[in-house]
Image (cartoon, grey):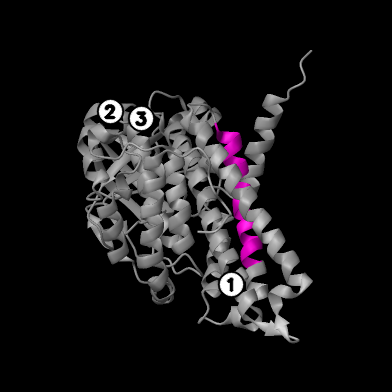
Amino acid sequence: MGRLAQTDGLTEIQQEILRTVRDFVDKEILPVATDLEHRDEYPAQIVEGLKELGVFGLMIPEEYGGLGESLLTYALCVEEIARGWMSVSGIINTHFIVAYMLKQHGTQEQKDYFLPKMALGEIRGAFSMSEPGLGSDVSAISTKGERDGDDFILTGQKMWLTNGGTSSLVAVLCRTDEGLSPEEAAAKPHKSMTTFLIEKEPGFGEVRPGLTIPGKIEKMGYKGVDTTELILDGLRIPADRVLGGTTGRGFYQMMDGVEVGRVNVAARGCGVAQRAFELGVAYAQQRSTFGKPIAQHQAIQFKLAEMATKVEAAHAMMVNAARKKDSGQRNDLEAGMAKYLASEYCKEVVEDAFRIHGGYGFSKEYEIERLYREAPMLLIGEGTAEIQKMIIGRRLLEEYRILG
């Protein structure tokens, strides 16, 4: 383990968890990641290993069978896993967000039913906000949930659903408009949204009456993990599967989940950047030009210095955002900054490592080629860089408003 991206003040339990996860990454993920990624193969054996380690229940409270750990512990584990293969961290992240939303906002019955199974990885979660035509404009969703006696009927189409095929529980954001006039619903679209907890069988096609997962979306990177559409065509859901039991709270529940998800994406960026630095600094000492290793050329040393500084800065911001949330404080500013910086720096560090590899960086035989295709996803996942800057700018104006 190198000097970069160390975290002070961790307990012995946290350190032991991280050592265990890092050892798993080095032995079980790194040796097979590139081969699995090139085949776009779901890492079933890796997922089983993470279930045995208890990673799927890392932040679920002990009373529900989880480890009851902090967001910081979880984020540091994600950093380690993304260092091995970012797709694996994506499998865990969507599950974690749904478990977090249940823990924070679920009814007691929902917590009792779902969380113990989620802690064991028996139920694996996914969540869905986006739709084909709206991108980052969550307030414009058109998927509807209409009450029908003690049930709701869901109709619409969702997009970019990570774990859409392999998950067995999906938290889906729909428009319900209950108790609002058309004018109120139009003026305050956020108050007309509801999160539904949809149970389904893993797989593709019509996985339950009224619910279809068409198949995997082909992507340039972020392979292995399935990304799908979700089509709702008169899906009947009982009212007790409204998250929290009350309609109209979905937007705020989802944003709470995405806030911790942004810390997760920052952690992923940190992990991928660390791996890119490791590959770059190793290759620079092995490859020789003009009679000496390229690491001895000042131009390469400058690149390594810049890469290491970015790895360290991104890690520090990610840790700060996680600790702020763990302390019970609002962290949307810090999470937005961490996600923005870590994803941008990740892209830059990966590109510099790619440049250090020269022509070999373009070869599928070298790991850096995989990282080069994976890094761009972080620029758009959990809100684009532009959305992060909007959030940061608005929060700064709130904090620094001139009075009088």
Question: Of the numbered discs in the image, which one, if any, rests on residue 105?
Answer: 3
* Residue at the disc numbered 1: 282
Residue drawn at x 63%, y 75% as measured from the top left: 285
Q: What kind of residue is marked 2? A: Thr
Q: Main secondary structure of the magenta part?
A: helix
Near-viewer residue (357 or 235): 357
The percent coordinates of residue 354 (x first, y second) are 63, 72
Q: Which marked residue is nearer to the observer: mark 1 or mark 3? A: 1
Which SS class for mark 2?
A: loop
Question: What is the crowding at mark 3: few (fewer than 14 residues within 10 Å), some, or many (at least 20)?
Answer: some
Tags 3 and 2 touching, CB below 8 Å = no
Near-viewer residue (281 or 260): 281
The percent coordinates of residue 264 (x first, y second) are 48, 47
Q: What kind of residue is marked 3? A: His
The percent coordinates of residue 143 (x first, y second) are 41, 44
How far apart are the two marked residues, 3 and 2, measured between alpha carbons?
Answer: 7 Å
Q: In this view of the protein, can residue 30 be seen by the observer?
A: yes
Residue drawn at x 24%, y 27% as measured from the top left: 108
Question: Of the numbered discs in the image, which one, if any, rests on residue 107?
Answer: 2
Task: State which quadrant residue 345 falls in.
Answer: bottom right
Residues in magenta, as a range: 331-351
How far apart are the two marked residues, 1 and 2, measured between alpha carbons?
Answer: 51 Å
Which SS class for mark 3?
A: helix
Near-viewer residue (320 or 190): 320
On screen, residue 85 versus residue 124, left or right, reads right
